Amino acid sequence: MPELPEVETIVRGLRACTVGRSVTGVQVLRQDVIRGYTPEFEEALTGRKVEEVLRRGKNIIIKLAGGPAMVVHLKMTGQFTCNRPEEEILKHTHLLINLSDGGQLRFRDIRRFGYVILVKPDLLAELPQLVAMGPEPLEITFESFACRFRGRRQRIKAMLLNQRVLAGLGNIYTDEALHRAGIHPETPANQLSERNLRHLFEAVREVLSEAIARRGSSVENYVDAGGAAGTFQLYHRVYRKRGQPCPLCGTPIERITVDGRGTHFCPKCQKISAGS
Ligand SMILES: [Zn+2]
């Protein structure tokens, strides 16, 4: 699933190929990827100029001048790319949006958990999936990060995955950040020392920033807005590395399940309540 660094990379690419262009045509190839689809969907977009492309958590938000905002969530296998219309339309492409400079936006999703939703601009802030979302990890202070975890009995991995606690993290970057911070993924949050929390805060920011710089991790079918794979998967230390040596200590990486999610960690570098 694309996480914060992948969605950020896509958003930056989309910004470059859409802002200032107008929508000249819309073709819906599969209506069920558009939540609450009505026949007015095409009409609501056509003729509108793309004003801004933003990211909030794992959501892509495209604002259209004088019209609705388009919120796109890629979920497991969604792709949102900027193409030339003459390029082959790959199987599982569900939406085509033509732009005034001759470009074409394409939404493609093999498993179809992803979706597109149109929202009136004044209702954007009230969209349930955005309203309940926690802060952006790259934009908060240590104190506002730490106060979300202090005194909570939930396991740290589950808390980091919870979009209401923190926006944008998924399985890849929680595993990578916990390894960098030397914290066992099953540690209850209230057992983390201030030093643990400080290390975790720094590790989350560090791993997200490095991943953005390397244009995301392509472990499933993630591609950027230009259709290119990311490279950060080459720098993963634990994610999907079961049995391979920990880059810090050489101990084989283990895989366990934490709250239903496959979790990779080093049993030597990451002990429960490493403390102080
Ligand atoms: Zn290790």
Image (cartoon, rainbow, N blue to C red):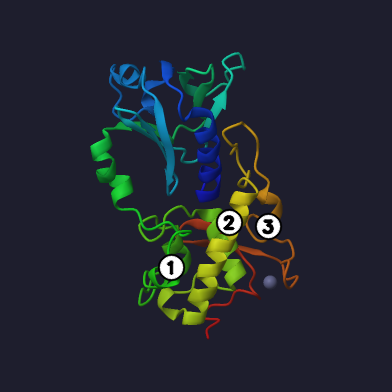
Which residue is painted at 58% across and 56% down in the image? 209
Locate residue 65 relative to residue 175 in the image: left or right.
left
Which numbered tag is attached to residue 141?
A: 1
On the image, the x and y values in percent for residue 186 come to 49, 70
Q: What residue is disc 3 on?
A: 241
Q: What residue is disc 2 on?
A: 209
Which residue is painted at 55% across and 81% down in the image? 274
Residue 109 higher or lower than 23, as above or below: below
Residue 148 higher or lower than 101, as above or below: below
Residue 186 higher or lower than 105, as above or below: below
Residue type for callout 3: Lys
Return the disc, 3 or 1, that comes first in the chain's sequence. 1
Residue type for callout 2: Ser
For ligand 1, the image quadrant comes to: bottom right
Residue type for callout 1: Thr
Whether residue 185 can be seen here: no
Return the disc, 1 or 2, that comes first in the chain's sequence. 1
Judge by depth and name the residue closer to the eye, 8 or 94: 8
- The residue at label 3 has a CB less than 8 Å from ligand 1: no
Which residue is painted at 28% across and 20% down in the image? 38
Quarter where residue 125 is shown: top left
